[in-house]
Every structure is written in C-alpha cells, then in structure tokens.
Amino acid sequence: MSRKVFINLPVADLPAAKAFYVQLGFEINEQFTDDKGSCVVISEHIHVMLLTHEFFSGFTPRPLSNAHQATEVLVALSMDSREAVDEIVRRAQDAGGQANGEPQDHGFMYAHSFMDLDGHIWEPLFLDEAAMA
C-alpha cells in the first residue's frame, strides 16, 4: 500500500501562508481548501495542511507552540540536486521566509534550511547516491 503524508501546520495568516508556498513552486488543492485551511501539494504523496490557529486548535487539547520562539519540528524534504536545494531556500527568502543557518555539505548529502512565515523549519536536502557508495 502506498502511504501519503499530511503535515498539519498552524498558520497565523492563511492567505499569506498559501501565497508563500505557491511562491516556492507548490500547488494548492482547492478541493481541500476553505477559509479555515488549505492543502498544499508538495508531491503525489506529501501534502501540507495549512490550518488557521483556531481550526488547528480543534484537533488537539494542547496549546499551540510559537515556532518563532521554539523549534517544534524539522521537516526534511528531498530535492533532485544541490541547485534545487539552494533554489528553494532562495525562493523562501524572496517570499518572506528566512534562511536558517548556512548550507551543510557532507559530501554525500547537501542540505540547507529555511523558516516559513510562521517559523516552521524546512530542511531541503540532496542525497548523492553515487557519493554514498
């Protein structure tokens, strides 16, 4: 069975969050989008649900963390090349996000990270399988 991943993220400003992810090159699935949430299609098997704070709070009795003040999760996302890693970090910065540290080059793996508008940390990475051997 093929599995899908749905990452649920609380966002302060849903229209701004949607625009941010569209600027990264992802699409919005309008079938699962309304004024409380939006589905961002990362790939066929990976989706991000951007949920307003109020709507997100309905799924958990625990308080929301402030991702600008504390790290809640690191979401790693494989990319096709080193250039693609650098490109998505650049797009994130152009869309109002922030680079998170410096690129990391481990020979077989190249990674960088960025924070979206709500402080959620994404870590795009490229694994060079030839260099892993």
Image (spheres, grey):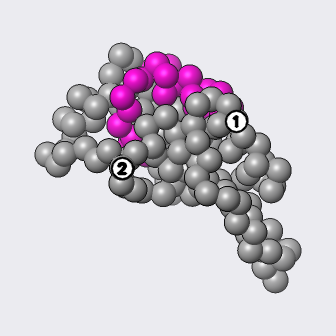
> Which region is colored magenta?
6-33
Taking the view exactly as shown, the residue that stands out farthest to the bottom is 133
| Left or right of residue 56: residue 133 | right
The picture places residue 10, in percent across and down from the top left corner, at 35, 37
The residue lying toward the viewer, choosing from 28 and 71, is 71
Q: Residue at x 42, y 23 (%)?
A: 14
Judged left or right of residue 52, residue 50 is right
Question: Disc 1 marks which amino acid?
Answer: Arg
| Dot 2 crowding, Cα within 10 Å, few <14, some 14–19, many 20+ | few
Category of crowding for the residue at label 1, using alpha-carbon neighbours closer than 10 angstroms: few (below 14), some (14–19), many (at least 20) = some
Distance between the Cα atoms at labels 1 and 2?
A: 23 Å
Q: Is residue 24 left or right of residue 58?
A: right
User: Magenta span has 36?
Assistant: no
Q: Which quadrant of the figure has residue 126?
A: bottom right
The answer to whether 70 is drawn above or below residue 64 in the figure is below
> Does residue 30 appear in the picture of this structure?
yes
Q: Are marks 1 and 2 in contact (CB under 8 Å)?
A: no
Disc 1 secondary structure class: helix
Query: Which residue is labeled 1 in the image?
Result: 91
User: Image point 78% across, 79% down: which residue?
Assistant: 132
Compared with 38, 35 (above or below) is above
Res 4 visible: no
Q: How many marks?
A: 2
Type of the residue with mark 2 = Gln
Residue drawn at the location 81% of the way across and 55% of the way down: 81
| Disc on res. 69 | 2
Q: Is residue 7 magenta?
A: yes
Residue 133 in percent (x, y) is at 81, 83
